[in-house]
Each structure stands twice: as C-alpha cells, then as structure tokens.
Amino acid sequence: MDKMKAAILYVLNQPLRIEELAVPDLLEGQVLVKISASGVCHSQLNEIKGKKGPDKYLPHTLGHEGAGVVEAIGPGVTKVKNGDHVVLSWIKGSGINASAPVYYSGDKRINSGQLSTFNEYTVTAENRVTPIRKEMPLDLAALFGCAVATGMGAVFNNAKLKQGESIAVFGVGGIGLSAIHAAAICGASIIIAIDVSEAKLEQAKQLGATHLINVASMDVVKAIKQLTNDKGVDYAIESAGLKGTMEQAFEVVRVGGGKTILIGNLPSGQKIEIDPFALICGKQIVGSWGGETNPDIDIPKYVELYLSGKLKLEKMLTHHFSLGQINEAFNALESGRAGRAIIGF
Ligand SMILES: [Zn+2]
C-alpha cells in the first residue's frame, strides 16, 4: 500500500476534491493508521468556508476526529503497536508530538496538520492516537475524537455537573447532543435543549433532554427563566457558534455561581457583548478547549461507558456517508439536517 484516496481543500468555498496521495515514510514519533471512520465537524465547515480567516496552507487535507487500526509505527513510538485499534483526535494526549506529514498528489505538495481523517490512511503523531479495546465498534469510536470528547468533557470537566443541577445547551449538533447526554448521565434535574431544528430537538430528547426550546417559535431567555422559577440555570453550554446564542447563554445562567461554557467558534474577528455587572454578581464565563479532555484518561472512560450500555452513541449518529460523498456530508451539516455524520471507509 503506498497510495490512498483523500479529500483535499484546494480553494475556499469550493467542493473538496478526491485525489490519490502517496503515503509518506514514517518519521520519528509518527504512526500510520488505516482509518475506519471519520467524524464530520463544524470546524472543517468553517475551514472550507474561510471563516477562520485567510488560509495560507492550501491545498491541504482535512478532518480531525476518527478511528482506525494501526498499520505501522515510526521510530520512537511506544504507545501503540501494529494492529491496535485507536481513536484519532486533534486533542493532544501523551506521546511524541511528531511533525505533521507532507503528502504528494503526483508532484504537487499537499499540506496537512498533525492529524487529518478524510483519508483512507493517515500519518499522524503518537500523541494524537489513543489505543482502545477491540470490542468497541470503530465507526462509533470515531466520535470520541472530537464531538463526544468536547461535549461530554464540557459537562464532566468544565461544569463538573452534579446530580440535581440544571443545564441549558444552545445548539444540539454532535457536541451539543454529547453535552446533553453527559448531563443526563450525571443526573441533572433540568436539561434544556435549544435549537432551530425539530429533528435535532427530538434527538436531544432521546438522549436525555427534559425540555426542548425551538428558537423559531419561543423566546429562549423568557422560557428558561420560567422553567427555573426566575433563577436561571446552573450551567449553559454554547455549541451553536453564534454571537446571539453566546450572549443568551450568559444571560440565562444564575446569578451567584452560574457558569457559561463557550465551545462554538465565531468567524474570526467577531466579538460578543456581555454586561460586566453580571460578572460582579457572580456569573462566570469560560471557554472549553476540547472539553479539557485528557485523551489517555477520558477516551478509555467513554469506551467503558459505551460497553456498559450507558452511552447511547447510536442515537447521536444521524448520517453515514462514503468518502466520495464528502461534499454531500458538508451540505447536510451546513443545512442543519445532520446532527453528527460520519464518513465510513
Ligand atoms: Zn471537531
């Protein structure tokens, strides 16, 4: 095997192109993984749409959550061996922070970050792979690389939500659904899902949301105040990536300790406005870096939760696509139809 198909971004706002790339030789600390499945995430949609600003790395590969089987290891790698099943994640764990690979399509250089997953194979750094038990289905394990790690991590690690507490989740795509499910596992008393899509809200209900707010037909702030006897919620998570919902998320947490956790990204340069007196009154606002996930500890924990039947990952997945349908997958994500889609190889 020395060639593989990969989806490549050549021009912003243009469909990805599927091309054959040469698989490079492994350098120190690099791992070659045959990818079984990759998650499709809003971060890549933002990259394709140029919302992260000018892209000096074009053309490049994409994708930052996946799962697969180790095919070969480079010098110095001790964390995994050939045949191991691994989760691939943009979030750094233990191991060598090896340099990013360079791929070639014919003579043309194709750039890559330290992890890309819209490829049949990936060359990545030892610290971007986490070995998992082989009983864990790889297509579902792909979600541990970003959506589940970030959404559940925001609840377990940022909020440290306790039984009986309340939470509102703005935007219930893959990350928001994971946050809702984590809150249900923690025994939250009120779990409010907020979105514009009835289909996603219905999915949120199946994963444990106790109340659904469709912003198309309800005043969110008023509705949350009513549900909480005017107090506000203990935690609000913003995973919609919108200025308006970030500000609302801050507005609906309770005075004296309520915590707003921002996960969504705004287009580069955009700002939010909040009332600083609310901070003085004890409201908090923090950002979450990948749910503050430690892959070495958290990913095996999610595997155990799934294998013990507590994690309903099947209910999170809405769409399956092949690599050849990658642009369709992004259309589904952009239109708001897809909660979490995966690309199967
Ligand atoms: Zn992601």
Image (cartoon, rainbow, N blue to C red):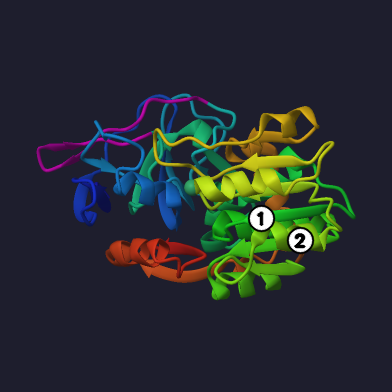
User: Residue 248 location in percent, x, y?
Assistant: 63, 49
**Mark 1 vs 2: CB contact within 8 A:** yes
Q: Amino acid at mark 1?
A: Val
Q: Which mark is residue 136?
A: none
Quarter of the figure with residue 326:
bottom left
**Is residue 310 something one can see in this rendering?**
yes
Name the secondary structure under disc 1. strand
Q: Observer-nearest residue: 298 or 288?
A: 288
Q: Is residue 77 above or below residue 250?
A: above
User: Residue 36 location in percent, x, y?
Assistant: 44, 58
For residue 99: magenta?
yes
Whichever of callouts 1 and 2 sits on the residue coming sooner in the sequence is: 1
User: Residue 156 location in percent, x, y?
Assistant: 75, 45
Q: Amino acid at mark 2?
A: Ile
Tell me if the residue at label 2 has its CB under 8 Å from ligand 1: no
Q: CA distance from mark 1 to mark 2?
A: 8 Å
Q: Which residues fall within the magenta stretch? A: 96-113
Q: Observer-nearest residue: 164 or 242?
A: 242
User: Residue 28 location in percent, x, y?
Assistant: 40, 24
The local crowd at label 2, few if under 14, some if 14 to 19, many if 20 or more residues have their Cα within 10 Å, is: many
Question: Which residue bears the numbered disc 1?
Answer: 169
For residue 76: magenta?
no
Q: Observer-nearest residue: 190 or 207?
A: 190
The local crowd at label 1, few if under 14, some if 14 to 19, many if 20 or more residues have their Cα within 10 Å, is: many
**Is residue 179 something one can see in this rendering?**
no
Name the secondary structure under disc 2. strand
Quadrant location, the C terminus: bottom left
Q: Residue most toward the left?
A: 107
Question: Which residue bears the numbered disc 2?
Answer: 191
